[in-house]
Amino acid sequence: MKTLQNTNPALILIDIQQGFDNIAYWGGERNNPDAEVNARKLLDYWRANQLPLFHIQHCSINPDSLLNENNPGNAHKEIVKPVPGEPVISKSVNSSFIGTDLQQRLEESGIDTVVIVGLTTEHCVSTTARMAGNLGYHTFVVADATAAFSKTGIKGEHYDAETIHLTALAQINNEFATVLNTNEVLSAFKKNDDFL
């Protein structure tokens, strides 16, 4: 298992936006109601220790999407709302690296480790983690700071949100990323003075 040993890890907060509060729009069921609370715990730690962080904001090109820039759902949730000076990167596809300057910003800052939180596990979190791993970053996904929605299968079968969440994490763990929980991330920092 990879360890958090980089001295300048970046926290990437993906799509924690108000549009995801409309559960019915996304499938009718969501797991992990504390995901945003845990993301905030990590954000507070990053802020307190002046570590690099990036807010990713999905700006759908579909005018009817809750995440379109002209709709209220595009806004960040208050719990993790960026403060002045914190970078916000807009994207219109699942990966935070496609059509953005995220990779350039990471390279310019000498960052080789990313810690990913946000919404949703099965879409933009997974896609960003897969690409980060392929690009060579030490990639960590925080399981209890991400969440998923239920899905309908190709034969009409129902998959509950927790199953979607857990299988999405299982598919990337130890292949594209290391999956941890919030307390494990914070404990890793506290045990390694090189982070501070």
Image (cartoon, rainbow, N blue to C red):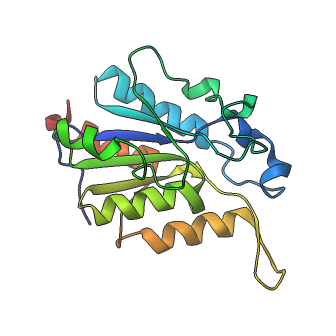
The answer to whether 142 appears left or right of 176 in the picture is right
Indicate the quadrant where residue 85 lies: top left
Quarter of the image with the N terminus in it: bottom left
Give the residue furthest to the bottom: 155
The answer to whether 11 appears left or right of 155 in the picture is left
**Of 92 and 138, which appears nearest the observer?**
92
Indicate the quadrant where residue 100 lies: top left
Q: Position of residue 93 (x, y in %)?
A: 54, 53
Q: Where is residue 133 in the image (x, y as percent from the top left)?
A: 31, 63
Quarter of the image with the C terminus in it: top left
How many numbered circles does the render carry?
0
**Of 105 and 38, which appears nearest the observer?**
105
Q: Where is residue 128 in the image (x, y as percent from the top left)?
A: 44, 56
Indicate the quadrant where residue 165 lies: bottom right
Residue at 58% across / 35% down in the picture? 37
Residue at 41% across / 59% down in the picture? 129
**Of 79 and 126, which appears nearest the observer?**
126
* As drawn, 94 above or below 76: below
Residue at 40% across / 27% down in the picture? 87
Q: Position of residue 48 (x, y in %)?
A: 34, 20
Give the residue furthest to the top: 84
* As drawn, 32 above or below 165: above
Residue at 36% across / 63% down in the picture? 177
